[in-house]
Amino acid sequence: MKIGIGNDHIAYGLKLEIAQYLKDLGHEVVDFGHHNEDRTDYTIYGEKVANAVVSKEVDCGIVICGTGVGISIAANKVNGIRAVVCSEPYSAMLSKQHNNTNILAFGARVVGSELAKMIIDSWLGAKYESGRHARRVNMISEIEERQKH
Ligand code: RB5
C-alpha cells in the first residue's frame, strides 16, 4: 500500500521508526513531515495527510502527535476522512471493520513503538465489512454534506 505519514515535533522520533517499519513490511511511505524536532503545529500535518488520502495520492494515512488527539481532530475536519486515535489494537481493528477508517492516529507520549506496531498491524490487517455498517458510514458522509450548506 501507499501510506501517507505525518507527525508533529513530539512524534518525530517515533515517526522515523514507524516509517521504517512500514517500509520493511513492503509498503510505500510518503512522509508529509514534520521533518525534525523543532516546535510546530499538529494541525498542519493532520490536514496534509488527510488531503492526500481524500485525493487518493495515498491509500491511507498514519498520523502521530503527543496524544494522537489533536492531529486526528485536524484530519477529521477534512471531508471524507474518518480518522481514529487508538492506544490498543482492538479498537484499531474494529474501526476499520465497522467504521471504514482511512487514517490511524496514535500518541508518541501514550504508546511505545512496539505497541504502535501492533496497532498498525491490526489496522492494516483488517477489512471494512460494509453490510450492516454501510448505512451508518453513509450517515457520517451525510453529516459532511449537511455541513456544506
Ligand atoms: C504538543 O505539545 C501536543 O499538544 C501535541 O503533540 C498533541 O498531543 C496534541 O494533541
Image (cartoon, rainbow, N blue to C red):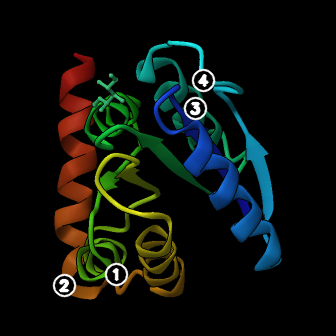
Q: Which residue is mark 1?
A: 93
Q: Earlier in the sequence, mark 2 or mark 1?
A: 1
Disc ID at residue 37: 4
User: SS of the residue at dot 4?
Assistant: loop
Point out the quarter of the image occupied by ligand 1: top left
Given the image, on which type of amino acid does mark 3 rest? Asn
Q: Secondary structure at mark 2?
A: helix
Left or right, 45 with respect to 84, comes to right
Q: Which comes sooner in the sequence, label 4 or label 1?
A: 4
Give the mark, 1 or 3, whose residue is nearer the N terminus.
Answer: 3
Closer to the eye: label 2 or 3:
3
Residue 44 in the image: state x and y as whole percent.
51, 18
N-term mark: 3 or 4: 4
Give how far across and how far down residue 126 sits, in percent.
Answer: 45, 86
- Numbered circle sitting on residue 51: 3
Question: Separation of disc 2 and disc 4 at Cα?
Answer: 44 Å
Q: What is the spatial separation of the Cα atoms under label 4 and label 1, in whole angstroms?
A: 30 Å
